[in-house]
Amino acid sequence: MTSRQIGNLILHKDSITLGFSLVFLWFSIGLYIDSAFRTANMIPHTGRIDRISSVITNVKDKPFFKETTKELRLTLNTEDDYFTSITTESFGSIRSRIKVGDTVTILTKPKIWDIFGLKRTRDISQLTKDDTVIINYTKYKRSISGLFILTFIFSIVLLIIYIVRTYDSSDTVPA
């Protein structure tokens, strides 16, 4: 392949299809890593809760209701920054089980894996107080299990569409 052909392939009118294919491939890799990650490989942060707060991060107007995204923020006495958990549900069940002054362990993903998956470095993957699991990573893994297969298949379909379209149009373009 010559550099001109490579340039035409990259700057093809259907390059947006290739872009979406790569984005969905990235999502599928991230979902696979999140679903295969084990709590034994996570970083534990143990300390006493200094502060518990929640903030509303997003409000979407749906046809019959407003969807509110909330963020729970926990600050430990051993850490400089706070840890977060994001949901559209209520934090009532979590806040009823922990309070300021309780000693908890928060498991987070290592920073190196921050580039992959949906959870970030300061996101609470698992929260335990004594021997009680309050936020369970296994429940999160179950909720995303199988999604990486769907996003991977969609990525491959978009890639095939892109290849077929660029191949067909490269036959009609004079060299």
Image: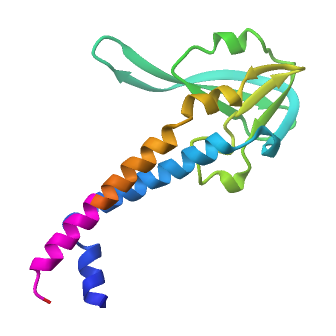
Rendered location of residue 175, percent (x, y): 15, 90
Determine whether, in the image, residue 109 is placed left or right of residue 18.
right
Rendered location of residue 167, percent (x, y): 21, 72
* Quadrant including the N terminus: bottom left
Name which residue lies at 58% across and 46% down.
32
Q: Nearer the viewer, residue 65 or 4?
A: 4
Rendered location of residue 157, percent (x, y): 33, 53
Q: Nearer the viewer, residue 158 or 100?
A: 158
Rendered location of residue 99, percent (x, y): 80, 14
Q: Main secondary structure of the magenta part?
A: helix
Residue 9 occupies which quadrant of the picture? bottom left
Name which residue lies at 63% across and 15% down.
91
Q: Nearer the viewer, residue 27 or 60?
A: 27
**Is residue 94 one of those drawn in magenta?**
no
Residue 73 occupies which quadrant of the picture? top right
Count of numbered circles in the view? 0
Q: Nearer the viewer, residue 54 or 164?
A: 164
Note whether 45 is above or below 69 in the view shown: below
State the scheme by which the image is colored. rainbow
Note whether 21 is above or below 35 in the view shown: below
Determine whether, in the image, residue 142 is placed left or right of residue 126.
left
Name which residue lies at 32% across and 62% down.
18
Note whether 107 is above or below 66 in the view shown: below
**Is residue 166 one of those drawn in magenta?**
yes
Note whether 137 is above or below 114 in the view shown: above
Name which residue lies at 45% across and 20% down.
68
Span shown in magenta: 161-174
